[in-house]
Amino acid sequence: MDIAIVGAGAAAVGLLDTLAATADRPGAITVFEPSPHLWRGRPYGPDLDTVLVNAPPAIMSIRHLDFGHYATWLGARGTAHLDERLGQPLVPRALYGEYLAHTAETALATLREDGWQVRIVTALVTEVARSGATWSLRTEDGQGHEADHVALCVGGGTPQDHYGLGGAPGFVDDPYPLARTLDRIPSGSNIAVIGSGLTAVDVVVSLVARGHTGPITLLSRSGVLPHVWQRPVGHRPQHVTSEQVAALHRQHGVVTLEDLIGLLRAELAETGEDFEAFVAELLATETEDPVRRLRAQLAAVDDSRIGRRVLQETAHSVGPYAWRLLPEPDRLRLGRHFRVATSVASPMVPVNAATMMRLLDSGQLTAAAGVRKIEDANGVFRVDGDDGERTFDVVVNAVNPPPSAIPRGAGQLVTALLADGSAELHPAGGLVSADPRLHVVGDLAGGGPFITSSIAGIAVQAARAAQAVVAARD
């Protein structure tokens, strides 16, 4: 069996790791990746040391169901990167990229020892089409390739230019890698950062670490900042688990949002926590002053309550499975709280939260919600928002791409698959395979939850795709 893997980021690493552990008969694997930074993808390539992994080791394992895999590899490497508030090592993303590369190379070595033929093709795939019982792939250099199965592991999208500022001097359309983009920004300039999520936090923290002295303003429509990770307390969910969700599905044939709420209610009841008060606190994210909430959450890093901890863990471990079982009305209901859900499930690490708080208190950093228009005006940027009109020297686009967005480099490939009828666009975004020999893994996969970019979620998808490939041989 010939397997073509298009893309060599985290999704490809998870796929190779599972294949190395489960494939019992050798075949051939060809990995297509034009970037020189194999196995790291866009998020984990070389960058500034201030660009940190935004999650503790327990949910960063690319090996499905082996939650200690990354922590074991990290070992003593994490000692120098301990977040004292969290009590966990939070390393630069480039170091996490080394973990992904090590995992991939170990998997490839195992596959080769087992008789697999492995090739790395450093070219962009531009066409994939069905040709009888096989797939025909073509790369940008005109070379043709054939495979029995194709796995699309092309990563996520890039920030959208919502205000049409592309090409304007002083506009940074995509901040990563920050080591490159921040070099172009004068240290005393007045900067606007579009967005208030984790990418915006990365930009602000890295700017200040590099000595930026000018004012920085976060511009967004909602003004919602990410929540803050709490120190792990060793609690393992007993009710909000995949096993309990599966049991509900077997019993009722469907899993509803009320079922999931019931599991969370039972989880909190075990420790005597007030469920209604917890929900009210979550929903207040949409209206509460973000600076006041950030201050309160920093003070609550050691709070013993488990509510947010359970949601932050299970959104990544149980969420992708539960989402597949929810009826569409319940998915839409959750989607109405998209900003709250992503803020809770993708929180900032305490060391970055403390930096943001210090900058907000000093006045160097401010946040402006209700932004309606940003335009290039004779060498400056004019911003119209709820607090009136303001001008800036530089604008950095830190808007997170929408869930399941199509990466720029994969546009031609996706167009070819749609034209061939091999895949379909999902109404909520992303791509859905129309052929069992085509596997979409990672952010591009349609029909998944809107929290798509977590390593735990990618590991689940990669393991499922590898198992489907192995099963097709039997």
Image (spheres, rainbow, N blue to C red):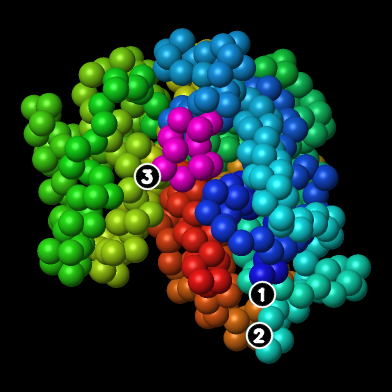
Q: Residue 416, percent across and down?
A: 70, 79
Q: Which mark is residue 417?
A: none
Is disc 1 in contact with disc 2, using a CB cutoff of under 8 Å?
Answer: yes
| Mark 3 vs mark 1: in front | 1
Disc 3 designates what residue? 317
* Magenta stretch: helix, strand or loop mostly: loop
Magenta stretch bounds = 60-70
Q: Position of residue 348 (x, y in %)?
A: 47, 29
Please provide percent x and percent y for residue 217.
57, 31
Q: Is residue 66 magenta?
A: yes
Q: Secondary structure at mark 3?
A: helix
Q: Which residue is mark 2?
A: 133
The residue most toward the right is: 141
Answer with left or right where residue 157 lies relative to residue 404.
Answer: right
Nearest the viewer among 262 and 132 is 132
Asked if residue 105 lies left or right of residue 79, the reply is right
Crowding around mark 2 (Cα neighbors within 10 Å: few <14, some 14 to 19, many 20+) is: few
Up the image or down, 124 lies above or below 137; here it is above
